[in-house]
Amino acid sequence: MFKRILIANRGEIALRIIRCCREMGIETVAVYSTADKDTLPVMLANQSVCIGPAKASDSYLKEDVILAAAMKTGCDAIHPGYGFLSENAGFARKCEENNIAFIGPSAEIIEKMGDKQTARQMMIRSGVPVVPGSDGLIETLEEAKAAAEKIGYPVLIKASAGGGGKGMRKVFSPEELAGAFSTAKEEAKAAFANDDMYMEKLILNPHHVEFQILGDKQGNLIYLGERDCSIQRRNQKLLEESPAWVLSEELREQMGRAAVKAAKAADYYSAGTVEFVLDENGNFYFIEMNTRIQVEHPVTEMLTGVDLLKEQIKIAAGRTLEISQEDVTADGHAIECRINAEAAGKIGQLHFPGGYGVRIDSHLYGGCEVSPYYDSMVAKVIVKGKTRLEAIKRLRRALEELIIEDLKTNAQFMHLLTYHPEFVRGNYNTSFWEKNSETIKKWYEEGFDGQAE
Ligand code: ADP
Ligand code: ADP
Ligand code: MG
């Protein structure tokens, strides 16, 4: 097993990794930007190293500085968390070359799966259903026009290097194409320094259903159920739950098998997630594979009792997976709600909910600073109930207990969302936000607090 792991990340995921390492008897080294000097990961790691100024490109994305810090502190592995360098094949390769284990799949696998257009072609060859779309990359507006005609409107222009919902534009008619193509391209270039574009049919009102995968270097590969992440704002997830309410047992198994097939196509190992969209007629299509631990991994942990992070670390160290597909059981219902800051600043008092069936993953503490430089997510509230309704009620009361003084967040909005009849019925898809956020905003303005029901 590893002796000392460097955590090339910040915030709640850095804390999650440190906590896991402590339980496993592994030492940790936190790296931090000057803006993160007084954060929990720095305080709780065994050692910490400052790697530069606040801007991520000057700190958390500085591959050589991070590698040097790992070597200097005698680390034998690096955990990249999510975002930042987690899906950067070049960085994974550099780690390998310097005899430091990258906790994730190999550089080769990241290359194959990280480029979404390449992954798409690989899925077609392996017989995993993909959304109808362009045959390869789309370089010019003329090619975009031809592809859109062939696929049929509406279409979705997507960045091959995309992530976090960026570099993506819906196009409903030929008139919108030119504008959408150039803005998506510009956004991709700015966010990923790569403006390779491709096109898919826009599936109307789909569910986002994804499967958690664990695979070891010996070739064992299992799936640990699914998560429905259809509550999204601008293609970015806000609430995730499992089981997915729309799936029949039959469809669940069919999709799970397709997810394993997708991962096998890349000889995948480590923790990973295969994402699908599911249309209104029950057809499902691969959209991408995330080759890292995901934000919403606790949903699956709550339901299956498997510590995904611990398994991911064990796999990176070469251990054989001890869980077989038959061992995977899920009982009850779990929901995660992402709490995002709407502005930066110093917070006052902090009170986190607790009690039966509640888990909070957060790097906040009373009086801490919320930095404007990074992702706005400050906490994840995860609940588990015997039934979906119990989980919803538990989430409501947890959000009612939550106090983050002096910080504007989406918490109240999310609390109201859990009262929306369509949400309560489990009758929602990725259009939910667009369709209902105005109504919820109105409730908010009118002072409805859910208690009247
Ligand atoms: P998940 O797929 O785990 O649900 P998200 O898509 O919400 O996660 O992204 C997780 C985090 O990683 C967010 O902070 C997001 O901004 C960031 N992220 C995801 N993909 C990329 C990428 N390709 N480049 C930069 N940041 C990314
Ligand atoms: P990212 O890398 O940013 O996570 P994804 O390819 O996973 O990008 O897409 C993000 C979200 O956009 C999905 O969760 C889904 O809601 C929506 N989406 C992606 N592809 C399609 C599609 N072809 N049709 C409809 N919605 C889509
Ligand atoms: Mg995605």
Image (tube, helix red, strand yellow):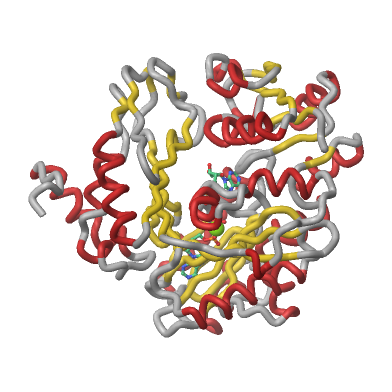
Image spot of residue 11 (x, y percent)? 54, 30
**Which residue is more in the foreground, 122 or 356?**
356
In the image, is 190 to the left or to the right of 28? left
Q: How many marks?
A: 0
**Residue, x 32% and y 35% (percent of image)?**
409
Residue 384 left/right relative to 121: left
- In this view, 93 is above or below 67: below
Is 247 rendered above or below residue 109?
Answer: below
Percent x, y of residue 279: 44, 78
| Residue at (49, 79) in percent of width and height | 249
Q: Quadrant of residue 51?
A: top right
Placement of the C terminus among the 4 image quadrants: bottom left
Q: Residue at x 33, y 54 (%)?
A: 391
Against 107, is 346 above or below? above
Q: Is residue 313 in view from this perspective? A: yes
Q: Quadrant of residue 247?
A: bottom left
The one of 219 and 196 positioned closer to us in this rendering: 219
Q: Considering the image in quadrants, where does the N terminus appear?
A: top right
Q: Position of residue 427 (x, y in %)?
A: 30, 70
Q: Quadrant of ligand 3?
A: bottom right
Nearest to the observer: residue 236 or residue 305: 305
Residue ID at (66%, 25%): 59
Left or right of 89 in this view: 327:
left
Q: On screen, 437 above or below 131? A: above
Q: Is residue 186 visible?
A: no
In x, y percent, where is residue 187? 53, 49
